[in-house]
Structure formats: C-alpha cells, structure tokens
Image (cartoon, grey):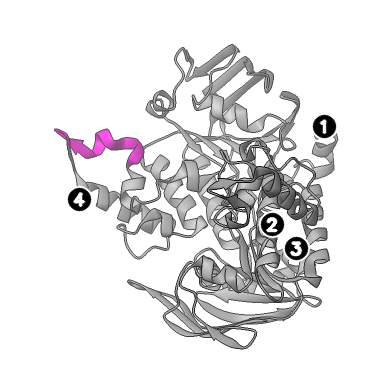
Amino acid sequence: MFELRNVEKRYPGVHVLKGVDFSVGDGEIVGLVGENGAGKSTLMKIIYGAVQHDAGDVLVDGENVHFRNPRDAMKRGIGMVYQEQSLIPNLTVMENIFLGFEEPFVYFGSINWRKMAAAARKQLEKVKLNISPSTLTSKLTFAQRQLVELAKVLTLEERTEGKLVILLDEPTSVLSKEEIDLLFTLVKELRRRASFIFVSHRLDEIIELSDRIYVLKDGVVVDTIDGETANAADIQKKMVGRDIHSQYYREDRQSSFDKNNVLLELEHVTIAGRGNDVSLALHAGEVIALLGVEGSGREPILRTIFGMQKPEKGTIKIRGEPVNAFSAARSVAHGIAYVPRERKIEGIASGMNVFENMTLSQMKNYSWGGILKVPSERALARDWIHRLSVKVPSENTDCGNLSGGNQQKVVLAKWRSGGSDIILLDHPTRGLDIGAKEDVYDMIRDMSQDGVGIILVADTLEEAIGLSHTIAVIRDGEIRQWFTCLPGSKPSPFDLIQHMV
C-alpha cells in the first residue's frame, strides 16, 4: 500500500535519513523503533507530508507521489495520531474532528451543527467512545483525546478511495494499562480498513502489536524483524549499538544521602482537594519517588512545591524557612527546579535556540546593563552539550527541532547549570528511548551524588524502585505508605501495588 525507496533527508550540518527503504502492506501493522535522534520523527513527517524528502521515492499503491503538505497526504488516505496531540482544547469534539473539512456542513455561510454532531457520532462509534460531540475538548482525559485523534483520522474513509495508512506516534506514552489494551483492541479491529505504522519506545508493546519491525539507527534501517520472532534485548542492542547496561537503573551508584541536611519539608499540606495532609522531608542527595495511579495526586504535589499553585493548608519550608509567597519565579530563586511531564509545552521554549533555553532561568547571570552576554551564554551551552552528550549540530539549533531525549537534556542542563539543588522530576523519561533513558538515569545519580535532593514521579514501578532511596505511595491525595529502598533490599512491585489501589 505504501513504500519509501532510498529516501534521503538532510538539514544544515546533519544527514538525518540515509537511503531509507520502508514499506507497509494491506492491513499490516508495522513497528518503527530507534533511539531519540535516529530519524524516526523525520521519517514520519515525510510519510505524512509535513516535511519534504531530498531524494528517493514515495509510492502509494505503486504510484509515485510527492506530498507538499499533510493535506496532500490526507487526500491519499494517510493520517497521523500525534504523540503530543493536535487537538485544539477550546473547540468542541466535533469541531476538532472536522477541522479544516467543514464544507459538507456549511449552508449559506453557516454551519449546520446538528448535521456535524450526527457525523461526529458516527466517527466516535468507530473508536467506541461514548461522549457528546459538543463536549469541550479541554474537558476530556488524555486517553479520550487520543481516541478523538483516531476518530479524526478515520474521517478520511469518507473522503478518500481505498484503505487508509494511519501513523501512531507514541500513542501509549501516558495511558494506563487498561487504556492501552483498549487502544490495541481497536487497532486490531481496524486492520480490515487501515494499515498502521506504530512508533513507540516501549518494546514490549511494539513486539505485541507489530507484524514487522523496522530498526532505525543514525538515519539508517539496520534491520527489519518479524514480529513473531522479535526479542526485546536484540532490538535494544540494534538500536543503541551495544548491550544494555546490566545495572539499568544504576543501583550500584546509589549512595547514602545526608540525613542531617533537610532541603525541603512539607508539613500537613492540603492541595485544593487533591492532596490531603501531605507531610515529607527531602534531604540532600535523596531521591524520593511519589508512586500512585493516574489521578492519585502526585503531580499536584510537585506543582505546589514549585509555586504553581498555593496549598489550602499546611506549611512548606525550604532549608528550614517557611514559604509565605508562592510563585514559580520565587521557587527558582530559592534553587527549586521543575522538569514537567509536557516538556514541549512547559519544559522548553520552542523557537528559541539551545543556548537561549539553557540560560532562560538565570538571565541575571548573563546580562549587564540590560545587554545580554551572548558569548558567555554560548560557552555555557557548549560546556553542557559536551557534559550531557546532547546530539545537536550547534548551540544555535532551535530547541523545538531536537529529539525528545535531547530536549530533556537541555531542560536538565538549564536547571543544573543554574545551581538548583532541589529538583522535581515529573515523568522525566516519558517518550525517551532506551539509550536516552540510561543517560537520564546517570544524570539522576550524578545529581544525587552532588547533594541535590530529587522528588520523582516515575514512568513505571520498576523505575521508581530502581532509582529511589525512599518511596511514598499515594492514594486519593494521601501518603498511605513509606518504603525504604536500600540497594539489594528494595521492595517488589507487588509490595507497592497493594497500597496503590
């Protein structure tokens, strides 16, 4: 149904794709894996028409095509469900589903909302989502928005001839197990009307869902693997070009924290109904993991500590001093850093380059008399690019064009270069490949050994157990149980789950 032949793509100073061959058969689910920076995002954008290739051929049903933009791709039945989601939150579900394709519902310059709602219900039925088409999109959960994205793509059935090719870009990155199972069931049912290209860093999911798996490294397809015989360890080795470290979470580097140096205290803090009587103490060099199911109240604790919302009750102390005024700027001034879950929205300033992003939180150190000291900014950025092995042509590169793993390194460099010694990590490895995760784990160990206190909301139970000195299990906004995580005697996932649900 779809094929790339010897496709090339270059950006200034970077050869992103090097002679890539890629194909998708009728009703086939094709997996695509690779490290951050391997070229996956560029390949997906070429397939979807958002980026034009420099050389090679793109074929749909054997016909050579050239997509100038995503609309051209959609006319040929190619749609994409984005990792970061493309829905507009202040529009309704039906407005998002038919955004840009409202013509069938327009009469004498006005939209027939009843007809649009009926058409939207038909699309929502395809993905088994029982919500009102007039619901404001901002009111939906992440999983519901993901299904609306899929329903939006499936409208191509009515606008194109033949079957569809649907690109799924990290569709499971923040979904629960039940939501992932529902999505996978839908994808398998939709195979009779569409083929899928599935990108994920979760290799178990790739193996479970895919008929074939392409492994991309440094812009080259290094292998194509049959889904039935695929092995996660082999795929990892092909992705990163080496065996994965046996001490994946770097437990051998876990050192004792300073019990006499308390950096942060929460005393009986209540957070707008989401956190109830939360008390904890973070010591220098300690990693505390906040563990709980989605909606348990972990994230609001981090955002309150960072000053993004004010507690209803209780006291927060920084190095023994009570906090009376809450704002992100005040927190930054007191050495608190926040690495958010949504790095593209809250972590980086897309459109600004790497050195501008790295110095964004410490402008007073890089200006004099209202004039920026740009050479000093550049020097700092080059130093941290080298320290953290950021894959980037230069410090002048737009941060929005970096891979997810390299964006995360820029965010961490921004805070570490500014001297923050209390760091709040909200899903720091979300959407990162196996190699980039290892780099982040090394950085967490480095920070801990430097006396930085870290509060972590992890992506998985295993990640929380492996990285932390202490685990606080949260349910319904309350800390229900504490666990000590000494190397060699860490709790099991089962020990934790029974207090989570």
**Label 2 to label 4, Cα distance in Å?**
46 Å
Label 4, label 3: how far apart the Cα atoms are:
46 Å
Mark 1 vs 2, N-terminal side: 2
Q: Which residue is mark 4?
A: 375
Residue 355 seen from this side: yes
Which is more toward the observer, 213 or 57?
57
Crowdedness near tag 4: few (<14), some (14–19) or many (≥20) residues, C-alpha within 10 Å: few
Amino acid at dot 4: Pro
Left or right of 348, for residue 282: right
Which residue is labeled 2 in the image? 150
Q: Report the residue marked by disc 1.
A: 499
* In this picture, residue 110 sits left or right of residue 115: left
Residue drawn at x 64%, y 46% is: 112
Image coordinates of residue 310 in percent, x first then y, are: 53, 18
Q: Residues within 10 Å of mark 3 (few under 14, many from 20)?
A: few
Circles 3, 1 touching at the beta carbon (< 8 Å): no
- In this view, the residue farthest toward the front is 108
Q: CA distance from mark 1 to mark 4?
A: 52 Å
Left or right of 486? Residue 415 is left
